[in-house]
Image (tube, grey):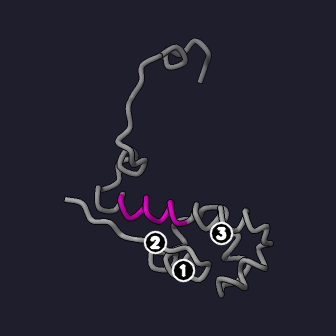
Amino acid sequence: MKKNDPRWTDASITHGSGNVFIDLGFDEAEAHVLLMRADLMIEIEKLIVAKGWTQAEAAKRMGITQPRVSKLLKRKWDDFSLDMLLTLATRLGIRSELKLAA
């Protein structure tokens, strides 16, 4: 994109919905599941970093292989189902709760 392109000087603000996946055009139901998956991956990553674990240590604690931990830390969300992420979080002592809202 060239510097004289009007998009460089466009100061308009577009407010998001609060769910980046909806903003990217995903179906609302799928967007909510994707957001839950992303949030779980972030919480798992935070715990691994806070504990100072290597990928090998984290893999052992979660009962998966080190390459799977690498994918998780690279946020390859398409490689992990919500069920799997809930299982991994539980194995690490992260308790999650599903809240329903109408």
Secondary structure at badge 2 equals loop
Question: Mark 3 = which residue?
Answer: 71
Residue visible at 65% across and 64% down in the picture = 45
Q: Is residue 79 above or below residue 7?
A: below
Q: Is residue 16 above or below residue 30?
A: above
Q: Quadrant of the C terminus?
A: bottom left
Main secondary structure found in the magenta portion:
helix
Residue visible at 38% across and 32% down in the picture = 15
Is residue 33 shown in magenta?
yes
State the image coordinates of residue 59 (x, y, percent, origin top left): 71, 81
Tell me how far mark 1 sits from mark 3, CA to CA. Answer: 18 Å
Q: Which residues are magenta?
A: 32-40
How crowded is the residue under tag 1: few (<14 C-alpha within 10 Å), some, or many (20+)? some
Tell me how far mark 2 sits from mark 1, CA to CA. Answer: 8 Å
The answer to whether the residue labelled 2 contacts the one labelled 1, judged by CB atoms less than 8 Å apart, is yes
Question: Mark 2 = which residue?
Answer: 96
Of the two numbered discs 3 and 2 on the same chain, state the one appearing first in sequence: 3
Q: Is residue 23 above or below residue 56?
A: above
Question: Mark 1 = which residue?
Answer: 90
Q: Which mark is residue 101?
A: none
**Camera-side residue of 97 and 58:** 97
Dot 3 amino acid type? Lys
The part of the image, by quadrant, that contains residue 90 is: bottom right
**Camera-side residue of 70 and 50:** 50
Dot 2 amino acid type? Ser
Of the two numbered discs 2 and 1 on the same chain, state the one appearing first in sequence: 1
Q: Give the residue furthest to the left.
A: 102
**Count of numbered circles in the view:** 3
State the image coordinates of residue 82 (x, y, percent, origin top left): 45, 73
Label 1 or label 3, whichever lies nearer to me, is 1
